[in-house]
Image (cartoon, grey):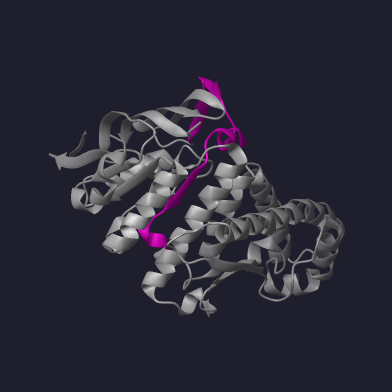
Amino acid sequence: MALFLETLTLSHFRSHKRAALEVDARPVAIFGPNGAGKTNLVEAVSLFSPGRGMRRASAEAMTRRPEALGWKITGTLSGPAGRHELSFLSEQGGARQVRVDDKPATQTRLGELARVLWLMPSMDRLWIEGAEGRRRFLDRMTLSFFPAHGDLSLAYEKAMRDRNRLLKDQVRDPGWYRALERQMAEAGAMIDANRRAALERLDAAQKGAETAFPSADLTLTHPETPLPDGSEALATALAESRARDLHAGRTLIGPHRADMEGVFAAKGVPAADCSTGEQKALLISLILANARALAADIGAAPILLLDEVAAHLDATRRAALYDEIIALGAQAWMTGTGPELFEELGERAQRLEVTETAGISEIRP
C-alpha cells in the first residue's frame, strides 16, 4: 500500500493565507514563478515528519505576515499504518502542537506514521561545507529508519549542555559529572549505532539497485579518534577527557563531533573533489537509496520532497529520476519554475500551478 497525503490544508502558513488540496498517490509537480510560494507548500508537507521541517525554521517564522495570527496545517495521510488525520498548530508563534486523529502526539509517533525525505538547493553544498550539515543530513536519514533516534539526540544534547555549563564554570568535582556522562554515554552509544546501521542500509540499497545515478561510499568518522564502542567505553572516555574539556570549555568527544565522508564509488574520488553536477547526482542517489531501503522496511516508499531538483538536471538525467520515482511508487512533491520541467512525467503525475496575486498565493490544478 502506498504512503501518501490525500488532502492538505494550510491556514496562514508562510505566504498561503488559505489553501486546500486533494491529491492522489502519484507524484505532484508544482510549478510557478519564483516567490509564488512553491517551496512554502513543500515545507508544509515536510512538517509531517519529526523535527522542524526542511528549513529548520521556528514556529514563529512560519506564520503569515503581517497578520501573525499563528498557523495551522492539516492533512489526511494514507499508508501501511492505515488512514490518519494529522494536524499541526502554532498559536501566535508558540511551539508547534502535533495531533494525530485529534489526539496529542509525540514526535516519535509522527515518525512511525509518516516517513518523509527531502532534497533542497541549500543542500547542494553538503560535501564542501562543514561537518554539521553532513551530520544533520545523516541524522535525517537515520531518523527515517529509527523514529526514536530524535529522542535520543535530544536527550544527548540536553545532558551535554548541562556538562558544558559545568566545564565553562570550571567545576572540577567529579561527582557533578558522573550522572551527566552516564546519560550522554547511553544515548550517544545508541546514536552512533543507529547511524552506522543506517549507513549499512544505504550501502546495501545503493549496491542492490540498477540506477542512472552514481553510488557513494559513506564512512562515519570522528575528528580525533574512533568513537569508543558502547556506552561503558564512551562513559570512560568522557571521564578521561574532563581535563582537556575543562581547558576547552566544551565537550570534545562524542557523536556530536562525528562527520560523514563520501566517495564517488565508481571513480574513487572524494565527493568534496567532484564536480558540482556529480555532487548533486550523489545526493540524489542517497535520497533514492534511502527511499528504496525504507520501502523494503515498511512496505511503502516514503513521501519525497524535491525542491527545484529538475532545474539542475539535463533532460536525460531528469527522465531517469522520474522513472525511478515511478518505479518506487513514491508520492514525490517536486517544484520548478515551469511545466516543461516535468514533461517527461506525462500522465504519470498530477500538476499544480502556484501564482501570486496581491500578495496572496493561489494554487490551481
Residue 116: in magenta span: yes
Residue 233 visible somewhere in the drawing: yes
User: At x 63% / y 68%, what residue is drawn?
Assistant: 219
Q: Position of residue 355 (x, y in %)?
A: 17, 41
User: At x 46% / y 62%, what residue is drawn?
Assistant: 283
Residue 331: in magenta span: no
Q: Locate residue 319: give its quadrant.
A: bottom left
Q: Residue furthest left?
A: 358
Q: Which quadrant does the C terminus fall into?
A: top left
Q: Locate residue 309: give its quadrant.
A: bottom left
Q: Locate residue 70: give its quadrant.
A: top left
**Foreground: 210 or 281?**
210
Look at the image and give the residue range highlighted in magenta: 96-123
Q: Position of residue 92 (x, y in %)?
A: 39, 33
103 lies above or below 51: above
**Foreground: 30 or 250?**
30
Residue 309 visible somewhere in the drawing: no
257 lies above or below 98: below
Q: Residue 361 vs residue 122: left or right?
A: left
